[in-house]
């Protein structure tokens, strides 16, 4: 019986040693870490961004009166189309007309006196001083007549350009002081929006660059726009500048005041770039994991620049052609053996798969 128990214990002891050896072997043969690689290249970074704004008319004029008085006519309402020179409103001009008639009569008499004094001066009957006074009176009378004629023209208000009346703020019979806002006329065929852009991107934009504009009220369609103005000042608080993008001609259904989204796309000069996911940070600074020929990775400190979309500019620390880890950072340490799966820089003999879930 004792011999049987000893044999069983010996067998269990051997089996345990065998399992421990197998575990150590398995640990030594741990599979390589799966990563996705990216080959560092020099290229033109493309900046794309969406900015929100509101449409407004490029040409919008507030119609103000130059003369006080009582309105006798306001012939247009909101939504009416007008052509340049069309009548918009008219003031009671009877008093000015009477003043103009009086000024015209005064000017005629002054002209007669002026001509008579010149003739008499030629005959030696009057002095030079008398001719000078007559000349002055004539010129003052003529200027007064021109002034009243101009004021009389201001009693009739006309459209400054072809457009649409967007506001009517008065009615016939209203008495208004000078410089009262009566009407607003806009040109609906040319719409514009103001958007803000980062100071880092402004140097890459220029007048005439294309932009895509989506107007929410008109659906998902993109409409062609162009940058027509770049404001010279930068907001010191937000470090952003302003640009103006125009829709010319405006799409059917577009109206001033509608919400819109401006899609900008521009390029930055040739630079080394990497996926934003490849750039890591720790207390020592920014770094990437560089793939080495022996299948391991090494930590490499880098200096980054502009971040445009899902890419980042690499200003120092890498060379074109080097391969870096773009995904798979969880548990990854310098010197660790890795296995590339998919990505732009996977070895030629490695089948391209979906990106690993390493991180």
Image (spheres, grey):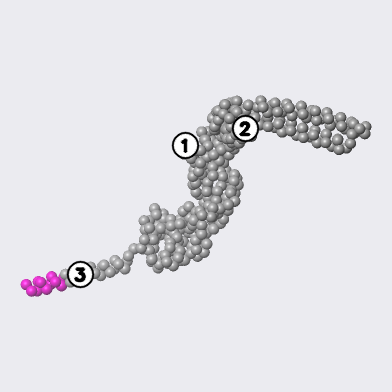
Mark 3, residue position: 16
Q: Residue at x 50, y 43 (%)?
A: 53
Q: Nearer the viewer, residue 327 or 59?
A: 59
The answer to whether the residues at label 3 and label 2 have Cβ atoms under 8 Å apart is no
Q: Which residues are magenta?
A: 1-11
Identify the image quadrant of residue 278: bottom left
Q: For mark 1, does the 10 Å Cα neighbourhood hold few (<14), some (14 to 19), or many (20 or more) residues?
A: few
Residue 296 percent coordinates (x, y)? 41, 66
Q: CA distance from mark 3 to mark 2?
A: 110 Å
- The question of residue 3 being in magenta is answered with yes
Q: Quadrant of the N terminus?
A: bottom left
Q: Quadrant of the C terminus?
A: bottom left
Mark 2, residue position: 68
- Asked if one can make out residue 133 in the rendered structure from this viewpoint, the answer is yes
The answer to whether the residues at label 2 and label 1 have Cβ atoms under 8 Å apart is no
Residue 72 percent coordinates (x, y)? 60, 25
Point out the tag, 2 or 1, that comes first from the N-terminus.
2
Q: CA distance from mark 3 to mark 1?
A: 75 Å
Point out the tag, 3 or 1, that comes first from the N-terminus.
3
Q: Nearer the viewer, residue 232 or 304?
A: 232
- Asked if one can make out residue 248 in the rendered structure from this viewpoint, the answer is no
Residue 304 percent coordinates (x, y)? 49, 61
For the residue labelled by badge 1, is the local secondary structure a helix, a strand or a loop?
helix
């Amino acid at each position: 019986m004792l011999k049987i128990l000893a044999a069983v214990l010996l067998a269990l002891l051997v089996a345990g040693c065998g399992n421990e050896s197998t575990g150590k072997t398995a640990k030594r043969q741990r599979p390589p870490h799966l990563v996705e690689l990216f080959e560092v290249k020099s290229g033109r970074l493309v900046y794309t961004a969406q900015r929100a704004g509101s449409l407004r008319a490029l040409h919008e004029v507030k119609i103000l009166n130059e003369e006080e008085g009582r309105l006798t006519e306001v012939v247009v309402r909101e939504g009416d189309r007008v052509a340049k020179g069309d009548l918009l409103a008219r003031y009671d001009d009877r008093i000015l007309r009477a003043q103009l008639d009086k000024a015209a009569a005064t000017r005629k008499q002054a002209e007669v006196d002026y001509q008579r004094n010149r003739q008499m001066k030629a005959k030696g009957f009057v002095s030079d001083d008398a001719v000078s006074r007559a000349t002055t009176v004539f010129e003052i009378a003529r200027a007064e007549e021109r002034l009243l004629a101009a004021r009389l023209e201001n009693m009739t208000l006309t459209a400054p350009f072809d457009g649409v009346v967007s506001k009517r703020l008065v009615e016939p019979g209203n008495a208004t002081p000078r410089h009262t806002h009566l009407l607003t006329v806009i040109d609906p065929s040319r719409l514009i929006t103001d958007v803000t852009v980062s100071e880092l991107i402004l140097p890459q934009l220029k007048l005439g660059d294309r932009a895509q504009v989506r107007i929410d009220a008109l659906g998902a369609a993109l409409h062609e726009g162009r940058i027509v103005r770049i404001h010279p000042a930068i907001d010191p608080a937000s470090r952003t500048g302003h640009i103006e993008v125009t829709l010319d001609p405006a799409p059917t259904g577009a109206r001033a005041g509608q919400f819109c989204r401006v899609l900008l796309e521009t390029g930055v000069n040739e630079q080394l770039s990497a996926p934003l996911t490849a750039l890591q940070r720790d207390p020592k600074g920014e770094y990437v994991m560089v793939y080495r020929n022996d299948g391991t990775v090494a930590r490499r400190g880098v200096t980054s620049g502009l971040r445009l979309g899902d890419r980042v500019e690499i200003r120092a620390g890498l060379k074109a052609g080097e391969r870096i880890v773009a995904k798979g950072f969880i548990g990854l340490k310098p010197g660790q053996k890795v296995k590339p799966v998919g990505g732009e820089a996977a070895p030629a003999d490695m089948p391209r798969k979906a990106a690993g879930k390493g991180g």
